[in-house]
Image (cartoon, rainbow, N blue to C red):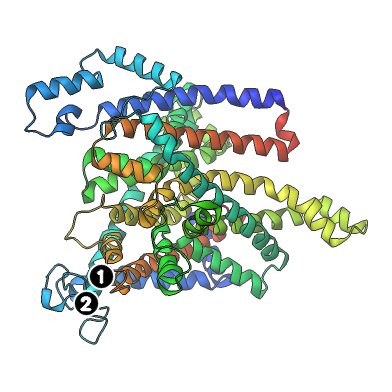
Amino acid sequence: MNAEASSVRPALIRSFNQNKLSWVGLGLFIVIVMMAVFAPLIAPFDPIDQSIVNRLKPPSAEYLLGTDAFGRDVFSRILYGGRISLLIGVVSVLIGMVLGGSIGIVAGYYGGRIDLVLMRAMDVMLSFPTLIMGLLVVAMLGPSLQNVIIAIAATLVPKFARIARAPTIAVKERAFVEACRALGFSDLRIMTLHILPNILAEILVLASLWTANAIQIEAGFSFIGLGVRPPTPTWGGMIREGFEQIFQAPWLAIVPGLAILLTVFALNLLGDGIRDAIDPKLKDVG
Amino acid sequence: MIWYIARRLLLAIPTIWAVMTVIFIVMRTLPGDPAYAILGDSATAEAVAALREQLGLNRPVMEQYWSFLAGVVQGDLGTSLVFKAPVLGEMWRVLPFTLELTLSAIVIGAVVGIPLGVVSALHRNKLIDYVTRTLSLLGLSFPVFFAAIVLILIFSIELRWFPVISSGNAPGISGRLQHLALPAIAASLGLIAVTTRATRSAMLEVLGEDYIRTAKAKGAPRRLIVYRHALKNALIPVVTVIGLYFGLVIGNSVLIEIVFNRPGLGKLIVGSLDTRDYPMVQGLLIVYASLIIVTNLVTDLTYGFLDPRVKRP
């Protein structure tokens, strides 16, 4: 693992230097995370405090990005909305990665009937469009922060399973795995300590790209009205509310849209850079 | 080729069966008694009993399962609780709108994305390559409903070229196209980006192959090398990527139909989930899954057509 990590790090810096936009992505993402983490310190107003006399104010010195139909400060809501987007994006990908990754490794390692049953189940899950499957899960469980995370994680499980399975099959044929078996190591130990570190890089690349997707999907749910409930600010929910005022106050839909766009763009730039560093063969796939 | 198609079709059958079974189970694990969920907690016992009878919920589970499968095979997907009409008829009415939206998005994606990818690959690491790559990454990052709203702001509200609400039902072909244009462009943005990226990387890979060098060495014209030799082989992975992306386009069509207030499967499923029209939701899930399975099939077949090696088992 150590040898692996030390060879990846210089490659990462080299690849980032080759494509300077990766650094832009990294910088942008750090700024966005900071703004979300320190939202309570930065935000000039309470994000859910209504003030009807100040409704639909255009951007000004007091209200940097204007106010919405309830007189709430859009800038403060963007900061707090970022917390929801990032939280859902990161946690749902982590859950999807752990569950899907485990399924993929187990399927690839044991092969045979276990592989067939597990991967067929994953194929069935993949037969539903991501957004539809997520919608269904949210409809079954009810819209809440926790359930949106479950819904998005559920759509990611089969994808991670597929990504983890293929390299597992390649790695398990290698001599050191044979050696581990000869030494009498348990299957669990071989899978976690010897196979996982060898396939982790590939999984992590897709995790960064799929975090970007997860943020887009969450925004979609909130936009339909099946996301985290109001008055909690979410970027997708803000676009939904802003779209109703599109004629009088177009910035209400544009500002949160740009927030999503920038965050997803930063993650995509970052993911591309990491991918080029880890596996030049994968360049520009998917 | 015929055997290849037949084998593929046969392989799809168990997947379809498994998907139908999952849909059956999911629809029966929706929280609470569907009859109460539909009628509300204050419903009278008689009303609930009548609805349970209508939905067939009072029969044994296995019997429900068999009649469900038999219904699917015979094209009988039950009766919508909201429309009081067969589910299939209502879906059949809106299906063309979703199909014309997604198919035109795919056509735009391929027509714009493939040439962009070729140009980008041929001018690798030149300005035009950087611009194309950055723009396609940006296109990939646009949430589809935000792209739709931006298009409405520019082309409908500012320029007044297109209607704000694209109900899709305008009379005549030009009216229909006018209602289709913005939704289709919004749906195609991500596809253009994905197709460009896939074409670029596939072209770069193919252009480095030995047979291209041979073609160059024997003095074949550059144009012939690029389009005849390189592009045809580069298109194989591109077709797969477009096929994989179709599920996303279908999912995105839900958001686009809502933004433009356009009829379609997506608008229907969101409305049906809202009104708890479970037979309709069930029917729509079947249609969505079938669309994905058919797309995978078509992708595989196109693959076989483009790469003759695949056909031989």
Q: Position of residue B139 (x, y in %)?
A: 50, 63
The residue depicted at 50 percent of the width and 53 percent of the height is B176
Task: Tell me: B200 left or right of A196.
Answer: right
In percent of width and height, residue B13 lies at 52, 22
Outermost residue, bottom direction?
A61
Horizontally, residue B138 falls left or right of residue A62, namely right
Question: Where is residue A16 drawn, in percent x and y?
Answer: 53, 69
Same-chain status of marks 2 and 1: yes
Quadrant housing residue A118: top left
- Numbered mark located on residue A173 in the image: none
Q: Which mark is residue A79?
A: 1
- Amino acid at the residue labelled 2: Ile
- Label 1 residue SS: helix
Instruction: Bin the neighbour count of mark 2 within 10 Å (Cα to Cα): few under 14, some 14-19, many 20 and up.
Output: some
Between residues B9 and B53, which one lies in front from this camera angle?
A: B53
Give neighbour class at mark 1: few <14, some 14-19, many 20+ (Cα, 10 Å).
many
Nearest to the observer: residue A51 or residue B268? B268
Asked whether disc 2 touches disc 1, contact meaning CB atoms under 8 Å apart, the reply is yes
Q: Which residue is mark 2?
A: A42
Per the model, the C-alpha gap separating discs 2 and 1 is: 8 Å
Subunit of label 2 = A
Residue B161 sits above or below residue A129 on the image: below
At label 1, the amino acid type is Leu
Q: Name the N-terminal-most of marks 2 and 1.
A: 2
Please state which of residues B279 and B172 is positioned toward the viewer in this rendering. B172
